[in-house]
Amino acid sequence: MNFGLLINFPTDLPIKITKFATQIIYRRDTMQQVKLSENIYFLGFNDRRTHLFENIWPIPHGISYNSYLIVDEKVALVDTVERQFIDDYLEDIENILGGREIDYLIINHMEPDHSGAIKAIKGKYPNISLVGNKKTFGFVESFYFKPEKYLMVNDGDSLGLGKTNLQFYMIPMVHWPETMVTYDETHKIVFSGDAFGSYGTLDGGIFDDEINLDFYEIEVMRYFTNIVGKYCPHTQRAINKLAPLDIQMIAATHGPIWRTDLKWILTRYNKWSSYDLEMGVVIVYGSMYGNTKKMAEVIARRISERGIKNIRVYDASKTHSSYIINDIFKYKGFIVGSAAYNNAMFPNVEILLSTILHMGPKNHFLGIFGNYSWNGGGVKNLKDFAEKINWELVYDPIEERGALKQDKYDECLKLADAMADKLLNG
Ligand code: FEO
């Protein structure tokens, strides 16, 4: 049964219905067009299928890929989308342009979640000029094709489209070396690439004033810490570079478009990227038989008794490092415990710590502890981590063998006290 034939559309509905044999084809040329201004269109797609962003980071609430189309005397596309959306993306563009060509494809960032449709765009609009900086086109060649028609821009360069004037600002390593932003000085919009983006699909609401920001609070921060967190100094430089601009809207390549409460996102980015940490402790353990876990529980309880309210205890085997890293970027204390595993660290703790070393967050107090049955390996490797990360170790490492006994119990209390003292008194 074709349910489409049973639907009785009023004739004034803006939907074109074409009868083809027994099928009805609903054309997308009446799509709900979303505009940032009278001539700037939002072209975003929600991904609710992908489980792991970059095949690493969990996205249980999905993610959006946002591209933008500026229609003026000249037409410019700002970034593209992930390649799974190419067909709909090309169709949506065609429906807006109605046969017009695209003059420029502005490439703020080359990671394939945004460059995935470049080849398709070039195929459909062969006269298009790619706009990027000196680092952009090497990426284009390595991923897709050798660009022949392109415009290389430098920091502060302008490009006029008619009434709309664009400027380009380099923000390297936010998130790749070639990354730049495009500033529409006519409409005061920054097309910011990954910067100020978020995990989480856009479930109807697209602009910040259309959504409940409580939902995005953790998704914005996880996106920052997981993807851009390694590049905090670069993010600070980017914020300072953009600060003199009159910005009334921030259009990132993921998540909501910020047009009402820009302070909400800007203050958070500034705080996170400057390692402005809150009083609190993240305690992570890797435990097979519960003995390392028991030590973590003792330490957590004592820290609570000392008046610290923000304490997050994680089992490294259960909670993905995406979430733990997020809290490490939030709280100043970090205590990690590992059982020995085949003369080495517990594997899931090792994965977390290698991620922390890779991202290199700063300004933390550190405590370490562990447990073993027949040979060491956990605490030994935690000490190596402590040396590499170079955070302030608040107490000597504690290592128990098997069940927690009185002397090491007392040591756990002392470690907790040392951490509390540091947090409370600096
Ligand atoms: Fe959303 Fe670095 O790409």
Image (spheres, rainbow, N blue to C red):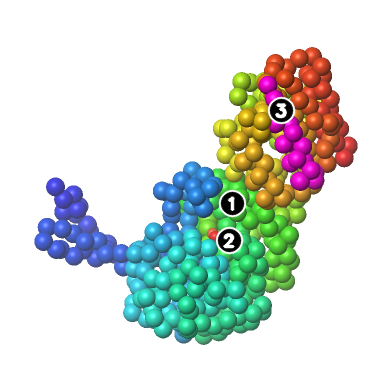
Single out the residue that lies furthest toward the right.
425
Highlighted magenta segment, given as a residue range: 374-391
Residue at 59% in and 44% down: 322
| Residue shown at the point (69%, 69%) measured from the top left | 242
Could you tell me residue 55's position as x and y percent?
50, 50
Which amino acid type is marked by label 2? Asp
Q: Type of residue at label 1?
A: Tyr
Indicate the position of residue 360 as horizontal and vertical percent values.
Answer: 72, 50
Q: Is residue 58 above or below residue 254?
A: above
Q: Quadrant of residue 412?
A: top right
Instruction: Point out which mark residue 223 bears.
Output: 1
Quadrant in which the C terminus appears: top right
Camera-near label (3 vs 1) is 3
* Viewer-closest of 397 and 34: 397
Say which residue label 3 marks. 376
**Residue 177 in view in this figure:** yes
Is residue 15 within the magenta segment?
no
* Left or right: 85, with 222 as reference point: left
Spatial separation of the CA atoms under disc 1 and disc 2: 9 Å
Q: Secondary structure at mark 1?
A: helix
Tell me the residue that label 2 is attached to.
Answer: 194
